[in-house]
Amino acid sequence: MIRFEGVSLRYGTGPEVLHDVNFAVPPGALCWLCGPSGAGKSTLLSMMYLALRPTSGRLSLLGTDVGRARRDQLPRLRRQIGVVFQDFRLLAHLSAFDNVALPLRLARRPEAQVRADVGEMLRWVGLSRRIEARPPELSGGEQQRVAIARAVIGRPALLLADEPTGNLDDVQAERLLRLFEELNRIGTTVVVATHNMALLDRYPARVLSIAEGRVRLDG
Amino acid sequence: MARRTDPIGLGAAMADRLLPGLAAAVSLLAALALGAAIAAAALAERWHGAASEAVTVQVSDPAGKLASGTPRIDAALRLVRAAPGVEEATPMQDGRLAELLRPWLGPAAEQLALPLPAIIEVRPHDEDWDPASLRAQLAEAVPGTTVETQGRLVTRLRALARGVQALGAVAVLIATGIAACVVVMATRATLAARRDAVEILHLLGADDRQIASRFARRAAARVAAGAVLGTATGAAVLAALAAVAGPILPINPARVGFSLPLLPLAAAAIGWGTAQLAVRNWLRRLP
């Protein structure tokens, strides 16, 4: 599902921020990505959602060798990956509904199905009354729920979340992690980056630890 | 992609607000250049026909206007037809003479009681034919007769018209290039303004075609709107010119009317294609 083989990354001519990373996350796994702030968790996730390409080494995602894939093959691969960005990355000029609908519309799903699925998803995250609100009109927690809804609406094969509980209260965080577990049970591979070690105790799973540019997989 | 929404937020981008105005200005210039090229082509065509008939023999009579069939004309006609190098010689009918004079003397040219000479149109075998010997024979046999040759002048005028026509075509090409450059700059500015939205869509799985076609449709619509305005203004200017200088400057309404509507269509195609290329080129920077 996710395979890093001797992967290194550097920005421009700067020093390597990731060095000789080797690990494999099997299909259907639930995995925590842990490490101190600045250790490179977001960088590693960025490579997993194809925002960054390795400087060297081999990265395979969902059975595709990213380094060898043609450029026109990557959008289809990206559509199979749901991402909850740490800074949400919502489109400020679109309503909550249209933000959540984006992955379905990009995949050219019928509009009737888009309406039904997005309505249901927004009800599930407790935003059925905020459908028409734009991100600047939403609180941080509400924006995060929109971002989560957008990440899971397309039933991705791989779900990546960067500190997804950061702006949620305990109840919402609990519901979110149960959703991740539920998606994982039906086959979605889930990788969640967090610095909250308490979550690891409450939801035991594989742990990818990152420190000083090196990565270790436990469990 | 979204049917009713604008996921990139192009509607909120200010960067291409000037695009219709610039497209209107460029289209106006293109319309005028096209009109000039068409008029020059018509002039060249007219002068091409005139070049072969650019030798005329004028048989004047101090007593007044000559009627065809008079001995002076018949004598001149016989001499001209017998001259070496002459393929054909025809007395000009009054109707045709009036038609030639109409642009200068108005619709009443035929009724004017002017002492006009009789004209014999001569078509030589060769445009460079030298009528010196014919001129001498006529001066001796039919005094008061003159031989006019405008072949060299007409050839030069024709070359000038072809030159104007070529310049018009070059001007249209330059206008096309300017339009493409304007679209590229506006598209790049819009991309810079909406970079975050484009990157998010790219990460969510939008392919290059989906993103580029958004920009292309908008560019085509804005350029076409400006081009319609510019072309309409150009058409009005050409119509006014045709009304004022129609007899001299032959702006054929049918040919101009067929060509000008193509300008907004061509402008829209340029806008669409250029924006597509500019956006796809920009997107190649993304991973």
Image: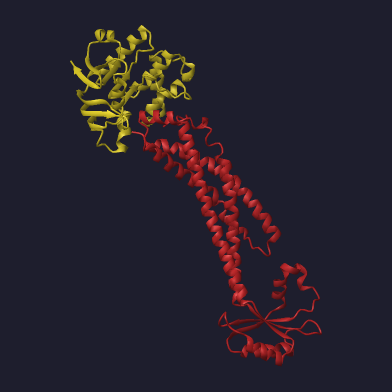
Residue A125 shown left or right of residue A196 in the figure: right
Q: Is residue B226 above or below residue A120?
A: below
**x, y percent for residue A65:** 23, 33
Q: Is residue B23 above or below residue A125?
A: below
**x, y percent for residue B55:** 64, 80
Residue B166 shown left or right of residue A37 in the figure: right
Extreme bottom residue here? B141
- Chain A palette colour: yellow
**x, y percent for residue B162:** 56, 65
- Chain B palette colour: red
Instruction: In this rendered view, identify the residue nearer to me: A178 or B158.
Output: B158
Residue at position x 38%, y 37% in the image: B283
> What's the coloring here?
by chain
Residue at position x 39%, y 20% in the image: A88
Residue A68 shown left or right of residue B41 in the figure: left
Residue A185: tell me if it is visible: no
**x, y percent for residue B115:** 79, 79
Q: Quadrant of the N terminus of chain B?
A: top left
Residue A216: tell me if it is visible: yes
Extreme left residue here? A219
Q: Residue B224 falls in which quadrant of the image?
A: top right
Q: Quadrant of the C terminus of chain B?
A: top left
Residue at position x 62%, y 58% in the image: B253
Q: Residue B86 falls in which quadrant of the image?
A: bottom right
Residue at position x 55%, y 36% in the image: B17
